Image (cartoon, rainbow, N blue to C red):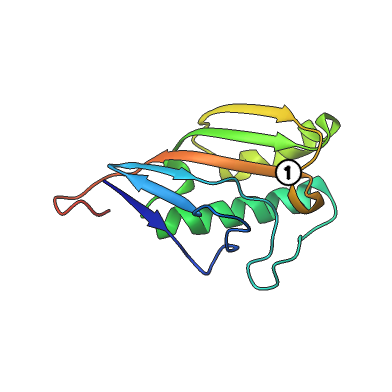
Amino acid sequence: MSNRVQTNNAPEAIGPYSQAIVTGNLVFTSGQIPLNPETGLIEGETIAEQTHRVCKNLEAVLNAAGARLTDAVKTVCFLSDIADFAAFNEVYAQYFTGKPARSCVAVKDLPKGALVEVEVIAEKEQSDDGCK
């Protein structure tokens, strides 16, 4: 059985998908781009600024699912320009301190002209009642 995750602390889905799905003790987030959840607009002009927003959005979605960034076991990262790899890594490392497995690729375009998108698979602890 799986449950959909929804929080107002992260941007609403901009398509027919959920912010995240929890099945058992695994959390699968949808990709997050640097949308400000209050305005719905891209936040930041540089890869560093946008990566901070993406990580904050992911943190909010994971928290709503009963998990934390430190629970991440795998991330998939999309950059609009591979030349931003080093600057992206500098910010990413501040949030993903547990060093999950990761893929990072450059893509032709991202939604709304974003420079970065990241999705996460996390494993959360479960209590006896199935909640964290």
Q: Give the answer, above or below, for where 68 lies relative to 12.
A: above
Horizontal and vertical percent position of residue 99: 53, 31
| Count of marks, rendered view | 1
- Report the front residue among 8 and 3: 3
Q: Quadrant of residue 119?
A: top right
Say few, some or many: other residues with alpha carbon within 10 Å of mark 1 (under 14 / 14 to 19 / 20 or more): many
- Report the front residue among 35 and 91: 35
Q: Amino acid at mark 1?
A: Val
Write the residue at 39% across / 50% down: 67
Q: Which residue is mark 1?
A: 116
Instruction: Say what secondary structure mark 1 lies in.
Output: strand
Left or right: 7 in relation to 38: left
- Report the front residue among 94 and 20: 20
Q: Residue furthest front?
A: 16
Q: Quadrant of residue 110?
A: top right
Write the residue at 28% across / 44% down: 125
Write the residue at 24% across / 54% down: 131
Q: Quadrant of residue 73?
A: top left
Left or right: 82 in relation to 5: right
Q: Residue furthest bottom?
A: 38
Write the residue at 58% across / 63% down: 12
Horizontal and vertical percent position of residue 124: 34, 44
Horizontal and vertical percent position of residue 118: 62, 42
Q: Give the answer, above or below, for where 89 lies relative to 33.
A: above
Horizontal and vertical percent position of residue 80: 80, 38
